[in-house]
Image: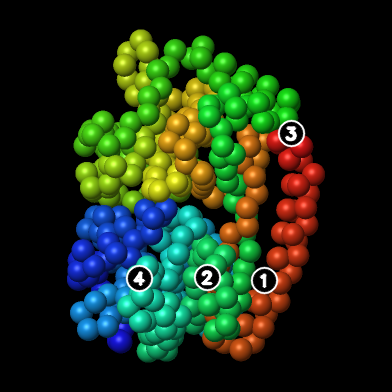
Amino acid sequence: MRVERLFGIERVDEAAWRSLEQPDFPFFDFEFLRALESSGSIGGASGWSPVYLVCKEGERILGALCLYLKTNSYGEYVFDWEWARAYREHGLSYYPKLVAAVPFTPATGSKLLVQPDAGEAGVPRAAVTRALLDAAQRLGEELRVSSSHALFLPERELDEFAERGFAVRHSVQFHWRNRGYGAFSDYLDALMSKRRRQVARERRQLEGEGLEIERLTGNELSPEHATLMYRFYLRTLDGKWGFPYLNEAFFAEVFRTMSDRIMLVLARDRRTGRSVAGALNFFKGRTLFGRYWGAAEERRNLHFELCYYQAIEFAIERRLALFEAGAQGEHKHARGFLPSLTYSAHAIHHPEFRRAIEDYIAMEKKLLAEDMAEYAHHDPYKR
């Protein structure tokens, strides 16, 4: 058993990689990683340089770990800018660092990708993950990184990182879960009356805006839709002084190769036929991920309809279990999205900074636990 370092997804055998892809997580699918690289959204001066650690026995792939050598902290959504600033103030360099994550994607999914039948072939999962994490540690030592990080880990993988001295950090997102609803009206009926009236009112007010809303997926999607969604993506960033991590080539590629895992919501002006807003979602297995949205015009409640209510309807129709609508957004809580802990793991190599950051993480956990308890007192669902 050995671990190879591959500096591009095209260097990995595509068929073998597919055996590692997760059933409910599209962002480590071969097509998504290839789109990031081929479009130039990562690599070069982006601050994201990929290193794929691939564990093999003979020519058979047993597992993989997607790592990135980072020279900044953009596009991570687990914020460590203050850590970098403290390093700089003490005459030290925080960059480069090593990160296990999906670029620009704050979605929870396995980082330690292991063949489902590895154990049946006589290789325990623990042996594969140990080999991958050993290889990651050696890589970090050779590259002389300040630290190593794994972002948006599933809870089941926390122990494997904690046992190696990583400090586990908590964050919070708001997720919607399907409680066996047969229709959107069932979801409304499950809400407290105040929240139910709020959602119904927002949808009713939008009806007077003269818009047609449609959901598109699979063969219904075209290259023109990719271009349209890219333009909406740029409009959102312009409004928030954001930086466009992704380019038009990325959108074109994922619409071409992942249409079966994309759900696009479009709003058109009924009178002119002009598209005025769009929301891009990815889905796989029983999970839906809201990713990007944008609007060419301001319309009342349009964001809530395209980004939340249409996606919830889609999840109910497809019997999806979970809808992750992205980072931040406390306003989601009133609309039935409940706070959920998300996890990251951090190994800081400088002894004094390690102690200081671990103390900060412990304090942060306590404050977040208080917030979670407060949210529990304002549950939007009927008790």
Q: Is residue 307 above or below residue 168?
A: above
Q: Are marks 2 and 1 in contact (CB under 8 Å)?
A: no
**Element under label 2?**
helix
Going from N to C along the chain, the mark reached first, 1 or 3, is 1
Question: The C terminus appears in which quarter of the rendering?
Answer: top right
Residue 331, by quadrant, is top right
Residue 73 vs residue 24, the one in the foreground: 24
What's under tag 3, amino acid-wise? Lys
- In the displayed structure, 20 sits above or below 376; it is below
Residue 382 tag number: 3
Give the alpha-carbon distance from disc 1 to disc 4, as whole Å: 36 Å
Q: Quick one: SS at disc 3?
A: loop
Q: Residue furthest front?
A: 120
Q: Earlier in the sequence, mark 4 or mark 2?
A: 4
The amino acid type, in three-letter code, at marker 1 is Ile
Q: Which residue is mark 4?
A: 117
What residue is drawn where x is 30% and y is 86%?
A: 2
Nearer the viewer's eye, disc 1 or disc 3?
A: 3
Q: Is residue 55 left or right of residue 168?
A: left
Sequence-earlier tag: 4 or 3: 4
CA separation, marks 4 and 2? 18 Å
Circle 1 or circle 4, nearest the eye:
4
Mark 4 crowd level (few <14, some 14–19, many ≥20, 10 Å Cα): few
Q: How many other residues sit within 10 Å of disc 2, few (<14), some (14-19) or many (≥20)?
A: some
Q: Amino acid at mark 2?
A: Glu
Tell which of 85 and 54 is nearer to you.
54
> Marks 1/3: CA distance?
34 Å
Please provide percent x and percent y for residue 199: 62, 25
Residue 72: x %, y % from top left:
44, 68
Q: Give the secondary structure at mark 4.
A: loop
Q: Which residue is mark 2?
A: 157
Q: Which residue is mark 1?
A: 361
